[in-house]
């Protein structure tokens, strides 16, 4: 099984800047859902205690080989019988970058949020925007035609799902590559190619 291609470090650096505006990552206990090859964990683990899960056996094995004392484990969120490997850990922050669109079963991710996110913790999520301007202009929108995607969200449906999971919206916007950081345009029009959400418990 091959890992889904990761975003580059510069993209994750932008994510860190946005997250730090709401919760400082230093000294935080963090879980990265869908950590793949661990680029985000490598970026933030100097000041944080980091854990990661991913469905991809090869990606997890490669990360463990590179980091002998890592806390990255295999976990398939689509499996109802999946064993969450960090049962005794409570997290200040759970990140979930470009994962939810690959899920056909949301029971495990809801369990992780409800049971393992601290009451003052944050859940950070990104996913393709099914209401993106690109789709309105060009029907060959990549989010729809990626065969690994099982579910696409609009800002409204993602917000609805997360609120029903017990979270409260802190920030939700749709960044463009050329206009990444939140502003009046990408927080109001909601036509960017990606959805970026921060939710509190």
Image (cartoon, grey):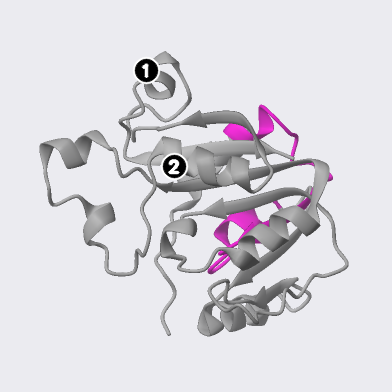
Q: Position of residue 11 (x, y in %)?
A: 46, 44
Q: Identify which residue is drawn at 74% across, 79% down.
A: 68
Q: Quadrant of residue 57?
A: bottom right
In the rendered view, tell whether residue 186 sits above or below residue 55.
above
Q: Which numbered tag is attached to residue 165?
A: none
Q: Nearer the viewer, residue 65 or 195?
A: 195
Q: Position of residue 126 (x, y in %)?
A: 48, 46
In the rendered view, tell whether residue 175 sits above or below residue 100.
above
Residue 160 among those drawn in magenta: no
Which residue is the site of mark 2? Answer: 157
Mark 2 residue element? helix
Q: Identify which residue is drawn at 50% across, 50% down.
A: 9
Residue 21 among those drawn in magenta: yes
Residue 107 appears left or right of 184: right
Residue 198 appears left or right of 157: right
Q: Identify which residue is drawn at 19% across, 50% down.
A: 141
Magenta stretch, residue numbers:
18-44
How many residues crowd mark 1 within 10 Å: few (<14), some (14–19), many (20+)? some
In the rendered view, tell whether residue 147 sits above or below residue 169.
below
> Gap between marks 1 and 2, in whole Å?
20 Å
Which residue is the site of mark 1? Answer: 185
Looking at the image, the residue that sits furthest to the top is: 184
Q: Quadrant of residue 19?
A: top right
Q: Position of residue 122 (x, y in %)?
A: 71, 41
Q: Position of residue 184 (x, y in %)?
A: 43, 14
Looking at the image, the residue that sits furthest to the front is: 164
Mark 1 residue element? helix
């Amino acid at each position: 099984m091959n890992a889904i291609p990761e975003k580059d470090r510069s993209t994750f650096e932008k994510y860190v800047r946005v997250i730090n505006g709401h919760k400082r990552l230093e000294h935080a206990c963090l879980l990265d859902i869908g950590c793949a090859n661990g680029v985000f964990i490598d970026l933030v683990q100097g000041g944080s205690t980091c854990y990661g899960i991913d469905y991809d056996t090869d990606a997890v094995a490669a990360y463990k080989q590179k980091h002998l004392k890592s806390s990255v484990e295999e976990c398939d969120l689509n499996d109802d019988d999946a064993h969450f490997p960090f049962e005794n850990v409570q997290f200040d922050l759970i990140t979930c970058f470009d994962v939810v669109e690959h899920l056909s079963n949301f029971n495990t991710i809801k369990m992780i949020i409800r049971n393992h996110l601290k009451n003052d913790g944050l859940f950070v999520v990104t996913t393709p925007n099914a209401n993106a301007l690109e789709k309105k202009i060009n029907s060959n929108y990549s989010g729809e035609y990626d065969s690994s995607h099982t579910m696409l969200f609009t800002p409204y449906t993602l917000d609805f799902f997360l609120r029903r999971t017990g979270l409260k919206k802190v920030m939700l916007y749709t960044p463009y590559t050329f206009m990444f950081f939140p502003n009046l345009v990408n927080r109001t029009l909601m036509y960017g190619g990606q959805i970026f959400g921060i939710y509190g418990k």
